[in-house]
Image (cartoon, coloured by chain):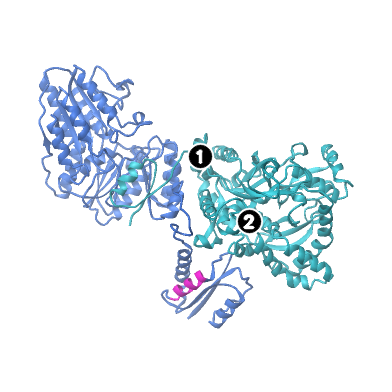
Chain colours: A cyan, B blue
Amino acid sequence: MTTVVTSGIDLLATAVEDQAVPVGRVDWRPPMPGTAADLATVATDPLRSEANRRALEAFLGVTARLVDVAPAAEVLGLERGQFLHAGPPITWDRASGPLRGGLMAAAAFEGLVDDPEDAPALFESGSFTLDPCHHHHAVGPMAGVVSPSMWMFVLEDAASGRRTFCSLNEGLGKVLRYGAYDDTVLTRLRWMRDVLGPTLQRAARATAGETDVTGILTQMLQMGDEAHNRNRAGTLMLLRDLSPALATSGVDAADLAEVFRFVGGNDHFFLNLAMPACKLALDAARDIPGSTMVVAMARNGTDFGIQVSGTGDEWFTGPAQVPEGLFLGDYGPDDANPDIGDSAITETAGIGGFAMATAPAIVRLVGGSVPDALAATRRMHEITLGENPRWSIPVLEFQGVPTGIDVTRVCRTGILPQINTGMAGKVAGTGQVGAGLVTPPAEVFPAALARLAELARGRGDHL
Amino acid sequence: MITHVDVRSGAYADSVTLLQVSRQAQQLPGVLAAQVAMATPLNLDVLAGMGLPVERDVSPNDLVIAFRLESADGVADTLAGIDALLAQASRRPDAGAGSGELAPPRTTAAALRRTPDAIALVSVPGDLAVLEAMDAVEAGRDVMVFSDNMPLEQEVALKRLAAERGSLVMGPDCGTAVVGGLGLGFANVVEPGPVGIVAASGTGTQQLLALLDHAGVGVASALGVGGRDLSAGVGGLSTREALRRLDGERAVELIVLLSKPPAPEVAAAITSYADTLATPVATALLGPGAPDLTAAAEEVLARLGVPVPDWPVHGLAHPAPSGRWLRGLFVGGTLCDEAMLIATEALGPVRSNIPLSPDQALPAGLTADAHTFVDFGDDTLTVGRAHPMIDPTLRLDHLARAAADRTTAVILLDVVLGHGADADPAATLAPALADVPQPVVVTLVGTAGDPQDLHRQARALAHAGAEVHLSNAGATRRALELLEARR
């Protein structure tokens, strides 16, 4: 039975229906303003179609395994006075409250200052250096601050030997990544350095790559986690996988009990494994000329930046937006900092907000309803290159999550990626104030498209 | 007997799906036993118990495909069969899955994911049509691009990819197609029959469909290729694919290639390609010195051994006592072209907004102290306005002006019926004709099956004083005769 898909003049669709042939009507609307010429150039770039196919295939071919836990000084070569942060590059003078708070906490944690309040002067004077996590194969949630003494998860793709890194999750509330820097924050960081990190290292080395983070993601997506704002099942599966090795690690029983209590009591612990797993897969899709696939979305609390496979390491940035959602306690929208963190790497990889349909338990947390969640995931299929057969959603008949954000489809439809996120207080030291939904600033996509078009024109193999 | 065990990393499917796939795999030809499962310890035991042990390191996230066959030469087919089963099992019905409303798709790509076998019909603004059309070609689907004003380089890029993917691009600026009986765009209702048409012209195709229909000859498919397809720039990419498709259609006994004069090198390539086909190809060229569409239709009938009927005429127009000029007011570009070619032979150069030579271009007002032919369907007159086959306003306005002009001697019009066209063109045209003092000749292009009712339209127009022809060439010659008779 023939069917017809129509875009444009409705009368032509009706004329087909008059012949008793079913019609699927495209709800066509003009693209984002000013993008028509670039869209046509990129659409007719002879490299694009194959480049996107390769990018998606490379992404889907990655399996992330936990191979080690080690200090950033060892695995990233960070030195005293060097700090990594979330999002695109930024300097102290433009840094938002939570990023400054996180950096102040880290400076005190490293013993560079005795009082966190003394750190700003040193950052202002340029005594310390700042660099994005993404420039070091790493990702960090919220402020994403990494300093040399912090312990990192090390994930590896066995096929290629590539690795990615992420710090250990501190839990909720007053924590460094939300910009808090009081004594409780520093005490916790020291315990993580002295007890949690070394213990996890023993377990990770003893299990030697048996912990398949990509595989856990497969399962947790069928257990109500979307792996950004809900990581409960993933955290428990991680504990399940590591507990035999933890039990036989020789670590003092009281310390071990504290490790179990800490990890088991922190529903977000697995987020810091989901994120580098997503980055490991997305990095495989980088640097394919002609590909319009987004390989990173990241925010530093001031700017929102994206990177695209076909445009190398260039960041396309715009102002980070303030999320909409629910607030803790007495906090309100005026207390919230603009969007921050590398955790949008999960949405870039097709989970988080893109897999909202699979996490009905948290739709209220981000201020939505179950039908909204289903609609959100379906809407994301409009702007993605394909589906991920490994990561599927039961309630959508096991349809794979929408995968590979396509700059051209975002510009064509005006549909922006939906990101689930936590909200940090905008004043340094506050901590978390809420959680909600946010989108990138629309202008980053036409900017990336313009660059893709420029590259296509410049290649000369283009007409 | 042979056993085969495949391990695939990263190819997860849930256990219920794999159970179904395993059961179906056991039904594949030559399969004695088959199991498709995730490599969990339990499943590995099951596989070993079936005599299909997995003899390498695997993790529970690996997919195992294991089977035993009667003979070794079935391995590739069985693997392909299981792949198809896996693909089928992972393909979900979109509508109704989960709860909540399914929003309409926003791009052709998204729509084709929902109905993967569909043909795409694109009529969005011309500078954006390539985006929707590319979606279809990348999905391996055929597409008709109704939109005009697509830049040439985009057409070339689109058709090059289509050639790689085996897709057919009809257009751009393709007004008419009949695909296996389904009319797309402005298409007449035709009976199935032995003729397949490949056409660079929409209204040219419609004229051919109408004439063949009157002669009792049906058409299997009429595939448009766009007016530039046989230019050197495009190189006949769509024409070649369309010819290949029609050659593969069982019902087609004769292929008619209806085209503007092609670039010589393209003509040679197409001719040599046509020679490789099992189905004979008759070429009907449009242009100076070439036979008109009616002659082309008669040639087709002759090749099929069908007698040529008298092309029908309703009503009778009488010469005007005064006036000098012939006024052609058309909605069909090819019909306008054809009329100009015939008129030029008798009258010398005529003025038009689609002139046969650039020096005969009409000014923006579309009037001149000369014989004039206006194509109201031309790109420049449809920007921001519906095609005149749908919205008659602009032409009716010019008809009234021509009628009021004492220098007008004869008026020549076309009316095109079929799907997509005005539901009752005579309802507005006939009352307008009643006020026209000059003789009016109308080409009424339509088939007996068209929804507007061809005969009722003809009667209504004839009743209003027009002389109504099915053949555009016939109508034009009659208009010239009336012009001559006035002198």
Residue occupying the far right of the picture: A114
**Quadrant of residue A231 in the image?**
bottom right
- Give the alpha-carbon distance from disc 1 to disc 2, as whole Å: 27 Å
Quick check: can you spot residue A287?
no
Mark 1 is surrounded, within 10 Å at the Cα level, by few (under 14), some (14 to 19) or many (20 or more) other residues, namely: many
Marks counted in the figure total 2
Quick check: can you spot residue B247?
yes
Q: Main secondary structure of the magenta part?
A: helix
Magenta residues? B16-26
The x, y position of residue A52, in whole percent, is 54, 50
Q: Is residue A374 magenta?
A: no
Hey, what amino acid is under mark 1?
Answer: Leu
Query: Which quadrant would the N terminus of chain A be assigned to in this image?
Result: bottom left
Tell me the number on the disc at residue A136. Answer: none
Residue appearing at x 34%, y 52% in the figure: A22
Subunit under mark 2: A
Label 1, on which residue? A39
The x, y position of residue B390, in whole percent, is 29, 36
Looking at the picture, tell me which residue is in the foreground, A432 or B178: A432
Left or right, B142 with reference to A243? left
Residue appearing at x 81%, y 59% in the figure: A192
The x, y position of residue B206, in whole percent, is 24, 41
Left or right, A292 with reference to B28? right
The x, y position of residue B271, in whole percent, is 30, 45
Label 2, on which residue? A281
Decide: is A182 above or below A411: below
Label 2: which secondary element: helix
Decide: is A201 above or below A95: below
Hey, what amino acid is under mark 2?
Answer: Ala
